[in-house]
Amino acid sequence: QVQLVESGGGLVQAGGSLRLFCAASGRTSSSYVMGWFRQAPGKERAIVAAISSSGGRTYYADSVKGRFTIYRDNAKNTVDLQMNSRKPENTAVYYCAAAESSYFRIAVPEYDYWGQGTQVTVSS
């Protein structure tokens, strides 16, 4: 089992920046693919960004390319999401997730472990 705990959410003005943090504990492994997802009210959970086990490959949803950056530190078992130039439509609950896979994963059902989520609200 892997436990994931997110932090760093809050209220930010449009155009501002925010960094989310995810700490992993339990049966951690540097072979996990890690991802950040978000779910806005009334919408399905969707991928924001993902990073391979080594950190050498990343994926970003089209809507966040150039504004968000995902980082991982396998020595510390952390995965961060730096979010710049926030937009009101980015308001959502953000989730950290881990996929126990050797292959790169970006779909919700492919992830095995989830954090409890952290609320991010962007005011206009």
Image (spheres, rainbow, N blue to C red):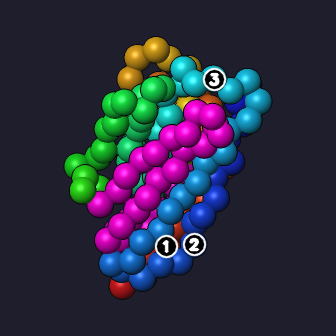
Most foreground residue, 118 or 85: 85
104 lies above or below 12: above
- Viewer-nearest of discs 3 and 1: 3
Within 10 Å of disc 2 (Cα), the crowding (few <14, some 14-19, many 20+) is some
* Residue that carries the numbered disc 3 in the rendered image: 29
Q: Which quarter of the picture shows residue 90?
A: bottom left
Tell me the quarter of the image containing the N terminus. Answer: top right
Q: Which range is magenta?
A: 67-95
Left or right, residue 99 beside residue 46: right
Q: Position of residue 70 (x, y in %)?
A: 42, 47
**Residue in the image at 54% along x and 44% along y:** 79
Magenta-colored stretch includes residue 76: yes
Within 10 Å of disc 1 (Cα), the crowding (few <14, some 14-19, many 20+) is many
- Viewer-nearest of discs 3 and 2: 3
* Residue that carries the numbered disc 1 in the rendered image: 121
Q: Position of residue 67 (x, y in %)?
A: 29, 60
**Residue in the image at 63% along x and 52% along y:** 6
* Residue that carries the numbered disc 2 in the rendered image: 10
Upstream in sequence: badge 3 or badge 2: 2
| Disc 2 and disc 1 in contact, CB within 8 angstroms | yes
Upstream in sequence: badge 2 or badge 1: 2
